[in-house]
Image: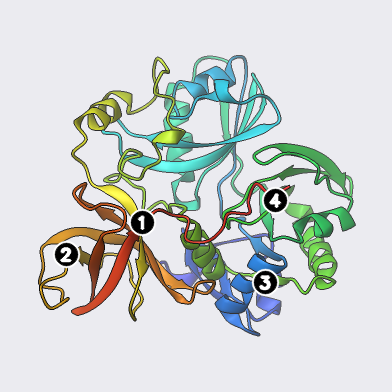
């Protein structure tokens, strides 16, 4: 945990303080975890049923510009930019030579010469440094971490909220548009980390407080709520979306995390390709699976996963480890992501060792709840 005085703060920091938010260190940034008036469960429910807004300005922002910028990025990151065109976004991964995940990020393709990256907070500097170290002449990589805010508007009523501000809402999932708001350019991308229809707005830091205020006012008509990173975590876990540092990382590759769909295997090169191809062919690594608790208990990261013994206890053989776990406000049961041996199959019964107590669970395929993110 960092000293509070050393933490970076969002352009919206004072808004959260004024609302009485519970603040905490998240990737070196002091960010809101929950707000008074219901906390995580109320905020989670608002997003699933109505609308909520999140300050996610801790996310990184970086630009890659210059002749051949997109081709350069494509030779570094895992996914294949040939799958999308200008005006579209793509989930991709930055790997090291061992195939470990340095970061997972969203990429906005503006043109063949202009790419905008949104890495995770704690990993931005390393991703930028790795790109800068290999950038060809004429391609410039610029860290814009503190120049922009990012506000996520998520939930079934998100279109109405953006429409009230005159922001575009008629584009497809994983695509983006730009708009002028108070004489500033706002990027509106139909993405999110909740599983609901929603948008992420990238705005200059100086206009972010006014934009936040306008969004709060617009969503009041729909009983929307400001939401903290606590609800963001329960929402993403219900969807089975991986979190870097938990479900992805230096020791958890895209193959292990079942993120191989975000790898352009046919590309000539990308960082970590040789190691990932070898791991994919070997088929001997643990794989990320979903666990739905069938008894009582809440799984947490690092809890061992075991085969049940004859009495249903936790003394059976260990077959994996929980990477993310929480109580699902939607399902009213515990859910988890876990790295499991390949011998464990969908539908199998296991037990999660929660501080020595056997919590029974079924191996399932995420998401745990119905997906709405692509709804029209």
Instruction: Name which of mark 2 and mark 4 comes first in the sequence.
Output: 4
Instruction: Name which of mark 4 and mark 1 comes first in the sequence.
Output: 4
| In front of the other: 81 or 142 | 81
Is residue 187 left or right of 47 when viewed as pictured?
Answer: right
- The tag on residue 370 is none
* Mark 2 in CB contact with mark 4 (< 8 angstroms): no
- State the CA–CA distance, disc 1 to disc 2: 22 Å
Foreground tag (4 vs 3): 3
Is residue 122 left or right of 152 when viewed as pictured?
Answer: left
- State the CA–CA distance, disc 2 to disc 4: 41 Å
Q: Quarter of the image holding residue 349?
A: bottom left
Q: Is residue 1 visible?
A: no
- The tag on residue 46 is 3
Q: Which residue corresponds to mark 4?
A: 199
Q: Residue sitting at 51 percent across and 42 percent down?
A: 105
Q: Which residue corresponds to mark 2?
A: 307
Q: Which residue corresponds to mark 1?
A: 246
From the viewer's perspective, is residue 333 above or below residue 113?
A: below
| Category of crowding for the residue at label 2, using alpha-carbon neighbours closer than 10 angstroms: few (below 14), some (14–19), many (at least 20) | many
Q: Residue sitting at 18 percent across and 49 percent down?
A: 343
Instruction: Name which of mark 1 and mark 2 comes first in the sequence.
Output: 1
Foreground tag (2 vs 3): 2
Foreground tag (1 vs 3): 3
Q: Secondary structure at mark 1?
A: loop
Foreground tag (1 vs 2): 2
Q: Secondary structure at mark 2?
A: loop
Where residue 176 appears, as percent x and y from the top left, is 72, 38
Q: Residue sitting at 55 percent across and 64 percent down?
A: 232
- State the CA–CA distance, disc 4 to disc 1: 24 Å
């Amino acid at each position: 945990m960092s000293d509070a005085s050393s933490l970076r703060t969002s352009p919206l920091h004072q808004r959260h303080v004024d609302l009485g938010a519970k603040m905490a260190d998240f990737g070196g940034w002091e960010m809101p975890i929950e707000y008074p008036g219901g906390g995580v469960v109320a905020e989670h429910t608002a997003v699933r049923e109505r609308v909520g807004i999140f300050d996610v300005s801790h996310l990184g922002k970086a630009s890659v510009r210059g002749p051949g910028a997109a081709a350069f990025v494509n030779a570094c990151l895992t996914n294949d930019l040939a799958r999308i065109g200008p005006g579209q976004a793509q989930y991709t991964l930055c790997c090291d030579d061992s195939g470990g995940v340095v970061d997972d990020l969203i990429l906005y393709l503006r043109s063949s010469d202009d790419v905008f990256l949104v890495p995770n907070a704690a990993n931005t500097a390393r991703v930028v440094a790795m790109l800068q170290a290999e950038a060809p002449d004429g391609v410039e990589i610029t860290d814009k971490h503190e120049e922009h805010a990012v506000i996520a508007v998520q939930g079934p009523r998100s279109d109405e909220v953006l429409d009230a501000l005159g922001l575009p809402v008629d584009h497809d999932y994983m695509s983006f548009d730009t708009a002028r708001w108070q004489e500033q350019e706002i990027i509106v991308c139909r993405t999110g980390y909740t599983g609901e229809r929603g948008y992420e707005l990238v705005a200059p830091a100086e206009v972010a407080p006014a934009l936040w205020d306008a969004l709060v006012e617009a969503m009041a008509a729909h009983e929307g709520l400001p939401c903290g990173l606590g609800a963001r975590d329960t929402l993403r876990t219900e969807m089975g979306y991986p979190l870097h540092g938990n479900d992805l990382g230096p020791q958890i590759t895209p193959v292990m995390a079942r993120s191989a769909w975000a790898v352009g295997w046919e590309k000539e090169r990308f960082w970590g390709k040789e190691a990932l191809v070898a791991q994919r062919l070997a088929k001997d690594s643990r794989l990320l699976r979903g666990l739905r608790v069938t008894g009582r208990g809440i799984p947490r990261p690092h809890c061992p996963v075991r085969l049940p013994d004859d009495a249903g206890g936790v003394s059976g053989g260990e077959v994996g480890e929980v990477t993310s776990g929480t109580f699902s406000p939607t399902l009213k049961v515990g859910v988890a992501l876990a790295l499991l041996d390949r011998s464990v199959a969908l539908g199998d019964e296991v037990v999660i060792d929660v501080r020595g107590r056997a919590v029974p669970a079924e191996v399932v395929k995420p998401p745990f709840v119905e997906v709405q993110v692509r709804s029209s």
